[in-house]
Image: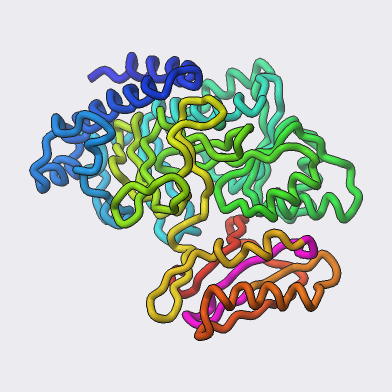
Amino acid sequence: MNMLPNRLHSLFSLIRHPYLEREEIVSFQDRQLRRVVTHAYENVPYYRRLFDREGLKPQDIRSVDDLSAIPITSKSDLQMLHARELVSRRANLERLIVLRTGGSTGKPMVVRRTWAEERLLQAFRWRAMHYYGQRSTDHIARISFIEETHPRDYQLVRRSIQTLGLYKWTNIDCRFPLRDILRKVQDVNPDILKSYPGVVHRLSHLLQEHDKKPICPRFVVVGGEVLTPLMREHVREAFRVPVFNIYGSYESNVLAWECKETGELHTCDDCTIVEVLKNGTPTKEGEQGEVVVTNLHSFAMPFIRYRLDDIVTRGTDTCKCGQPFSTIRNIQGRVMDYFLLPGGRLIHPWELSYLIDIASWIREYRLIQEREDRIVSQIVPRDNAPEEEIKKIESFVKERVGASVEFRIELVPEIQCEPNGKFRVFRSHVTSD
Ligand SMILES: [Zn+2]
């Protein structure tokens, strides 16, 4: 199969899709799904075995409604397999771009793509950025964990465009001391600032404290970790510009981008089929569930009904702003962030942090489950911590976790981030590490 016409068609259609009717997006999904499933069955040993085991044939999967017939694949199903089992026999393994998921998830996963696939997935990110108002003449400062570009990931197109002075960007390593990061961002004076929520959040405090030379981007884009309401509020206050959240993963690139009008996230329906499942069945609007993805443009290494280990709240079938995409109301975080309480009860720390998130005296916080029966909240206060407020938070949390779990608040001068520069708001020593 010659993929090039298909790629070019996808590239043009992604520009058109925001203006189409919902039905047209769904029929695009169905068409691409049939292509991916047929290709995977014919060319990828792992999927051939999976389908044969279930007595499934590609022709059984005609539309998104048929997806549930395919068993869900977990990270652990793929991690132990040789690349040849997962990569299409039509792809040249040596020529693929290799991406390794970050170590902070505990389970690194290797993802492979062709150069063209990588560019196509980046184009979906570009579409989201343009929706927020990015112009070709803008300069972006991106503060992130800088990894070496894979040797097969030729940057020819990007370099050519940048030679023309367009789509300029400056990468800044998020592991640098915060003051150095701030200085570099001030030097660049970017039109757009992009980073992890934790980094931008800390930067916003530093900016306010020291009356520094202001940074005046038109908007801030965050992604890659949990953005709590408290973080969003502080960043918005410090920069006085809108903050937009893009939800993505190594396996799929952009999964959803925040709607400017409703605050929900537009699911990238024309790139990935995102299912939100609870005990294997689709959730209703407003319900939380696990994310299972099917990539519509990954042929070198297909991902079909692949569990991402993320928890989100499902939104509407079509966004209220008029765009034809379905929505995700909220991103709670990763499955591994769940706290496992005595008696086997699972609670997402998101449910415990509500009062902390709206408290104006709190600058930064983290919730840690140290043991099954002990949860600690480290809090960095802005100045004085009011005794009454602390008591209120304590009784709010205790009510939710039960009497068998000890909860206490620790006031600390600062909270260290992870070695890779990321900031984990929630951490359970019981369910992860
Ligand atoms: Zn919308």
Q: Nearer the viewer, residue 349 or 106?
A: 349
The type of colouring in the image is: rainbow
Is residue 374 highlighted in magenta? Answer: yes
Residue lying at 64% horizontally and 23% vertically, measured from the top left: 167
Counting from the top left corner in percent of width and height, residue 271 is at: 40, 30
The image position of residue 248, as x and y in percent, is 49, 42
Q: Is residue 126 above or below residue 108?
A: above
Which quadrant of the view contains residue 352? bottom right
- x 67%, y 65%: residue: 355
Is residue 177 rendered magenta in the image?
no
Please state the horizontal and vertical placement of residue 77, each as a whole percent of the image: 26, 54
Is residue 383 something one can see in this rendering? yes
The one of 67 and 92 positioned closer to us in this rendering: 67
> Residue at image x 79%, y 64%?
361
The correct choice, above or below, for 60 with respect to 250 in the image is: above
Q: Position of residue 173 (x, y in %)?
A: 65, 47
- In this view, the residue farthest toward the right is 211
Q: Main secondary structure of the magenta part?
A: strand
In this view, the residue in front, 363 or 85, is 363
Residue 90 in sight: no
Name the residue rendered at 83%, 50% in the picture: 207
Asked where in the image residue 142 lies, by quadrant, the reply is: top right
Horizontally, residue 348 falls left or right of residue 38, namely right
Identify whether 123 is placed above or below 301. Answer: above
Range of residues picked out in magenta:
360-376
Q: Which quarter of the frame holds ligand 1?
A: top right
Q: Quadrant of the N terminus?
A: top left
